[in-house]
Image (cartoon, rainbow, N blue to C red):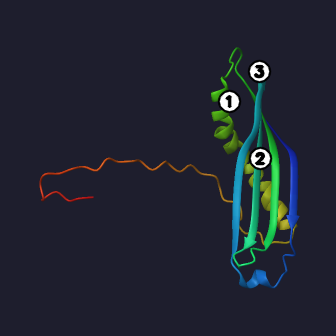
Amino acid sequence: MGVRLVAASIKSADPHESESAVSPVEIEVGFSPVSSECFGRLLRVILGFGAKAHHSSPTLTELFSVKCRFEMMYELEEGYQPTRDEIDAFAGGNAVFNAWSFFREFAQNTIVRMGFPPTPTIPFLRLAPLAETKTPKTTTSESEPKK
């Protein structure tokens, strides 16, 4: 596997503005697969990541934004040709997890270099199970507790 930063853009407001001391800050983080394709035994996945912060005040003053793209290269088993659905599932799952720590490190370092505090701005990526839909249980006895 190989990882390469292929694009980045950053934008910063003055971190010493007086509003930053009194207004809460909201941080948004996102990602999406940009492209994925096979070249012989190689799978190339490009992932886009972004983080931006703004004050929670009515003006929504943007403090910073960091956008970047990482190229992830994977070697495939001899003779294995994944389907488009398999490639898309891998790019949207495994590849994102593999690249997340590189994005997190890049964003954290960049945000500090812009003059903002070294707080844990970018969270660790974790899986959250989908909520199960349960069919309500009907009971005939009043002695059973209802949920």
Q: Quadrant of residue 21?
A: bottom right
Q: Which mark is residue 36?
A: none
Could you tell me which residue is drawn at 67 percent across and 44 percent down?
97
The alpha-carbon separation of the residues under discs 1 and 2 comes to 16 Å
Disc on the earlier residue, 1 or 3: 3
Please state the horizontal and vertical placement of residue 144, each as a whole percent of the image: 16, 57
Assess disc 3: are there few (<14), some (14-19) or many (≥20) residues with their C-alpha within 10 Å of its C-alpha: few
Residue at which label 1 appears: 87
Q: Amino acid at mark 2?
A: Gly
As drawn, 34 above or below 136 = above
Q: Nearer the viewer, mark 1 or mark 3?
A: 1
Q: Amino acid at mark 3?
A: Arg
The alpha-carbon separation of the residues under discs 2 and 3 comes to 23 Å
Circle 3 SS class? loop
Please state the horizontal and vertical placement of residue 95, each as a whole percent of the image: 70, 39
Residue at which label 2 appears: 48
Seen in the image, is 121 located left or right of residue 109? left
The alpha-carbon separation of the residues under discs 1 and 3 comes to 13 Å
Circle 2 SS class? strand
Q: Nearer the viewer, mark 2 or mark 3?
A: 2
Residue at which label 3 appears: 41
Please state the horizontal and vertical placement of residue 66, each as a whole percent of the image: 81, 59
